[in-house]
Amino acid sequence: MPAERLLQLTELLRENAQYWRCQPFMAAPEWADDSPLTDHLNAIDDASLLAAQACDEALISALTRVLPTQCEAIKQLCELPAPDLTRRSPGNGLSKEPSHVPGRKWAQICAFCDALPAPEHPLLDWCSGKAHLGREIHTRHGQPVTALEIDPILVEAGNTLSGNDPIHIHRCDVLSPEARHFLDTNQQIVALHACGELHRKLLRDAVAVGCEQISWSPCCYHKFLPGEYSPLSQLGQAQGLNLTSAEIRGAVRQNSTAGHAEKQRFVEHQSWRLGFDALQRSVRGKDTYLHTPPLNRLNQPKTFREFAEQAARYRQIQLPQQLDYPAFEKRGRERYQIVARQELVRELFRRPLELWLVLDQMMFLEENGYRCRWVAFCETELTPRNILVDAIRTPSPTGRGLG
């Protein structure tokens, strides 16, 4: 039951708040004085570090010896059922990979579609892009599709791809009141990786209209929040966890799909940030962390010095003429090795946090007359955001849902 699991996760998170509410990148956590835990983290080799950053199973394996109770609880509470693929309609799995969809995205779309029972209602593809998801479901099952997308270029391209099929993409900001006008009671909403407030708005609008079915895979829970995060469900609100945006971001701290070069760039840039942190504390004479700007993809600095000068301009810090940039860069690399291992303790709770957020959404729907079921619709190697929730307004036909 969603309510029972949410309460169990609340207890786990409350009891271990010191581990996931810290931010080692900004300051050493209080538990860093725990010698057995710190010694264990420092002994983790680089290969095991990368594996733990990318994979929940590897992360639990890396920390089981020093946090056995927490790791066992997380394994039990974070287990999700697999979809019942025997309930797919004969149409499933017959579509060919289109040349205009990236391979990984196409695999995610197919896995999402495979996990859904055959739809019985017209579809609304929420935050559709070019409506690849809606188009694939239509190809398999024949249901007409309405799609909503904010980018006019994607709207035009998607409508061109749809040809004469009953798939119509409308330009619409789903965060606006206008989006609700496209919803109907006799409708199934589908959404694959709508970020943060985009999928939360979907749920609120669907409940207000009374849509028959909602099938969604949430992503990037921290994005597009209009202000402070507030749980959707009454049960979630009653838990009083008071999650911050930074803590919610922790639910998606996983890089299982990143390539080798991307991971190397990430390590380099994080080391530069920590090197600049040491530099700015020295220059300002203040032992406090300062956030640095996101790196410009079109004009990324090629050296630590370029990055430091860019960050100093952003923070309006006057740098002295003579600075030992190589020394600060070295300090950043050394600090990263410590911080990355401390972050593993925080990341141990990334999946419990994510499941808590999803269960809050499920409870919001159940409190408003829906029956919810969830599955892990694909392996985390394909995408770590692999939770698919299917919510059906009650009363509904017996036996429907994800199984």
Image (tube, rainbow, N blue to C red):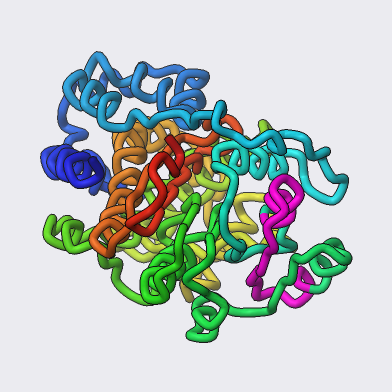
Residue 255 image position (x, y, % from top left): 53, 38
Judge whether residue 90 is colored magenta. no
Residue 326 image position (x, y, % from top left): 57, 44
Please state if 63 lies on the left or on the right of 311 as rendered. left
Kindly identify the residue that appears in the image at 15 percent across and 28 percent down: 34
Please state if 294 lies on the left or on the right of 96 as rendered. left
Q: Quadrant of the C terminus?
A: top left
Residue sitting nearer the eye, 298 or 332: 298
Residue 162 image position (x, y, % from top left): 83, 63
Q: Eyeballing the image, is 260 above or below 298? A: above
The single residue placed furthest to the front in the displayed view is: 397
Please state if 231 lies on the left or on the right of 161 as rendered. left
Q: Eyeballing the image, is 204 above or below 35? A: below
Residue sitting nearer the eye, 99 or 47: 99
Q: Quadrant of residue 245?
A: bottom left
Asked whether residue 367 is in view, the answer is yes
Please state if 104 lies on the left or on the right of 188 as rendered. right
Q: Eyeballing the image, is 352 above or below 152? A: above
Q: Quadrant of the N terminus?
A: top left
Kindly identify the residue that appears in the image at 39 percent across and 18 percent down: 44
Residue 400 image position (x, y, % from top left): 44, 43
Residue sitting nearer the eye, 369 or 160: 369
Kindly identify the residue that appears in the image at 13 percent across and 55 percent down: 239
Q: Eyeballing the image, is 92 above or below 239? A: above
The single residue placed furthest to the bottom in the displayed view is: 178
Residue sitting nearer the eye, 259 or 81: 81
Q: Quadrant of residue 258?
A: top right
What segment carries the magenta color?
134-155
Kindly identify the residue that appears in the image at 53 percent across and 83 percent down: 181
- Image mark count: 0
Asked whether residue 261 is in view, the answer is no
